[in-house]
Amino acid sequence: MIVNKSRAHGHVTLSKLPLRTEDIEKIPTITEEIKAMLVSNPKIDAPYCYLSRLEGPRGELTIGCNIKSTVC
């Protein structure tokens, strides 16, 4: 467990994007494009993107990754 966050070797980012269920057929393409973009960045580690919620006319796409810290 890291108590002092300044000593952490990286940071985690997480975003949740709302979607319409009428766009559900586009979700696999969107998630693959997002993951490919994140993987192409050398400062990004362990990216993920998936449909995390589907309720009625709305859904939610969860995107996250670890961001490697750089030493100055």
Image (cartoon, rainbow, N blue to C red):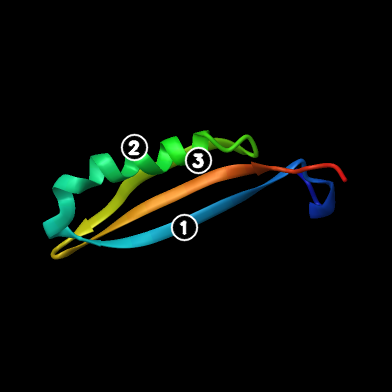
Distance in Å between CA atoms under marks 1 and 3: 13 Å
Which residue has dot 2 on it?
32
Residue type, label 2 = Glu
Tag 2 secondary structure: helix
What residue appears at the point 33 percent right and 42 percent down from the top-left corner? 31
What residue appears at the point 16 percent right and 55 percent down from the top-left corner? 23
Which residue has dot 3 on it?
38
Looking at marks 3 and 2 on the same chain, the residue that comes earlier in the sequence is marked by 2
Looking at marks 2 and 1 on the same chain, the residue that comes earlier in the sequence is marked by 1
Residue 15: horizontal and vertical position, in percent? Answer: 46, 57
Q: Report whether residue 40 is seen.
A: yes
Q: Depth check: give the residue in front, 48 or 3.
A: 48
Q: Tell us which disc is closer to us: 1 or 3.
A: 3
Distance in Å between CA atoms under marks 2 and 1: 16 Å
Looking at marks 1 and 3 on the same chain, the residue that comes earlier in the sequence is marked by 1
Q: Tell us which disc is closer to us: 2 or 1.
A: 2
Tell me which corner region of the image, top left, top right, bottom left or bottom right, holds residue 60: bottom left
Residue 59: horizontal and vertical position, in percent? Answer: 24, 59
Residue type, label 1 = Ser
Q: Is residue 67 left or right of residue 16?
A: right
Which residue has dot 1 on it?
15
